[in-house]
Image (cartoon, rainbow, N blue to C red):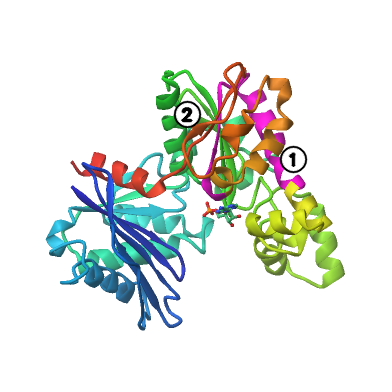
């Protein structure tokens, strides 16, 4: 079965076509600058990357261009659109309504729309992508895979905020968590690699990318995670602040003459390691600047790693133990120096790092020593494959 996986942002659309039997990617790419001017990047398996600049006023034109590229006579990965058997859509926020992936129908679209004000930047874009695919490929079954669904198993004491209960009752203000597809994929893979029973394994997954979150997975269920109502809570990220005393915001707002949306703009776009270092949100730049003696770059790196280690410690406490710790996503997979800084703070858990294994990049590998009390792994995430698997499971 061939699955088209779609991940729509407000002005972008990432896609892959995956053959579910071989789990090979047949083609992948993205549309950028939708609604501005428009650019299509298309790459068939084993082929050259093609870049085409063309107007894309809406996501519908973007989807049409993707379909045209996929079926192009010379470079298309498919002979015709009939070879697309199902479409899997990443949907950011499923609120409390979606506890697992679901076949998309009118009722589902309506319910996703009801979650729009929980993710005003993401969910409307996801729905536009769904509608564009529906218009252009009517009859092809579609599945929604939610970033939040995996975390719906969290207990109430973990997901409630310490604010008046009425805000939960009236508006569903609570922790939801994100990156669920990745946390689920990586924790399952950890059980496979270690040969342990997923149903009894205690795993902490550190998804460290430009957006970063940590998840405590106890017996295959997410029991706590660092992101909250929105993806702003928790770790220090590329440009996002993570946890901060809300009173600091009133203080800054008064000093700088900002309103709430101005403050949120700063917390989302101008904070994190970029805001601290003044250098970049990218750890390649930070590592270089730090090695050249830039003190704020070093501080940003240290703060990032410290916060990760603090969350790992708190999740080991939340689960009353931990068997496996996994690092994944751009930073988790590629930066041994961050993994080392985190693990060096976790000696009390009996963690011992294999420095040679830890120096590898981007591959699945055990990075703890044979006598380490907790096993530590790098496990590359693959959210698109996870979405394709979920899609096939529901469509078959
Ligand atoms: P993601 O959001 O998972 O795509 O991760 C993107 C981030 O991963 C980038 O902003 C970098 O900070 C980091 N990253 C990606 N590749 C590397 C690399 N080769 N070395 C160091 N950091 C990397």
Residues in magenta, as a range: 302-330
Secondary structure of the residue carrying tag 1 is helix
Q: Is residue 327 above or below residue 120?
A: above
Q: Residues within 10 Å of mark 1 (few under 14, many from 20)?
A: some
The residue where tag 2 is placed is 221
> Is 91 or 364 nearer to us in this picture?
364
Q: Is residue 176 visible?
A: no
Does 82 lie within the magenta span? no
* Label 2 CB-ligand 1 distance < 8 A: no
Give whichever of discs 1 and 2 has the lower sequence position: 2
Q: Assign the C terminus to one quadrant of the image.
A: top left
Q: Residue at x 55, y 40 (%)?
A: 360
Question: How far across and how far down the image is residue 70, in percent?
Answer: 23, 66
Ligand 1 lies in quarter: bottom right
Give percent across and percent down for residue 181.
Answer: 43, 43
User: How many numbered circles does the render carry?
Assistant: 2
Q: Position of residue 58 (x, y in %)?
A: 37, 76
Instruction: Look at the numbered disc 2 and give the secondary structure of its residue.
Output: strand
Seen in the picture, residue 155 relative to 48 is either above or below; the reply is above
The Cα atoms of the two marked residues, 1 and 2, are separated by 26 Å
Where does label 1 land, which residue? 306
**Residue in the image at 72% along x and 35% along y:** 310
């Amino acid at each position: 079965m061939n699955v088209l996986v779609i991940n729509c942002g407000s002005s972008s659309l990432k896609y892959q076509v995956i053959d579910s039997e071989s789990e090979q990617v047949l083609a992948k790419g993205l549309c950028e600058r939708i609604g501005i001017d428009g650019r299509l990047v298309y790459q068939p398996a084993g082929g050259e990357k093609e870049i085409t600049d063309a107007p894309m006023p809406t996501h519908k034109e973007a989807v049409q261009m993707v379909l045209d590229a996929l079926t192009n006579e010379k470079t298309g990965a498919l002979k015709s659109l009939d070879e697309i058997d199902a479409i899997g859509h990443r949907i950011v926020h499923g609120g409390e309504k979606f506890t697992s992936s679901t076949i998309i129908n009118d009722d589902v679209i309506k319910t996703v729309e009801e979650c729009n004000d929980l993710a005003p930047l993401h969910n409307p874009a996801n729905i536009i992508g769904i509608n564009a695919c529906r218009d252009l490929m009517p009859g092809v079954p579609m599945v929604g895979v939610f970033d939040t669904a995996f975390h719906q198993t969290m207990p109430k004491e973990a997901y409630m905020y310490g604010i008046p209960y009425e805000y939960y009752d009236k508006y569903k203000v609570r922790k939801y968590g994100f990156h669920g597809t990745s946390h689920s994929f990586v924790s399952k893979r950890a059980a496979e690699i270690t040969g342990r029973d997923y149903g009894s394994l205690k795993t902490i997954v550190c998804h460290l990318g430009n957006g970063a979150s940590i998840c405590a997975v106890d017996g295959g269920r997410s029991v706590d995670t660092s992101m909250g109502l929105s993806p702003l809570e928790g770790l220090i990220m590329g440009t996002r602040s993570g946890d901060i005393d809300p009173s600091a915001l009133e203080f800054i707002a008064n000093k700088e003459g900002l309103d709430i949306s101005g403050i949120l703009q700063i917390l989302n776009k101008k904070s994190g390691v970029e805001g601290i270092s003044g250098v970049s949100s990218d750890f390649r730049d930070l590592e270089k600047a730090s090695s050249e003696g830039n003190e704020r770059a070093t501080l940003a790196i240290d703060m990032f790693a410290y916060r990760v280690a603090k969350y790992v410690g708190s999740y080991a406490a939340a689960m009353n133990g931990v068997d496996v710790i996994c690092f994944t996503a751009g930073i988790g997979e590629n930066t041994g120096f961050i993994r080392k800084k985190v693990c060096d703070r976790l000696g009390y858990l009996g963690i011992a790092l294999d420095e040679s294994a830890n120096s590898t990049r981007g591959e699945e590998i055990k990075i703890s020593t044979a006598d380490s009390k907790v096993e530590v792994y790098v496990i590359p995430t693959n959210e698109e494959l996870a979405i394709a698997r979920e899609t096939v499971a529901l469509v078959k």
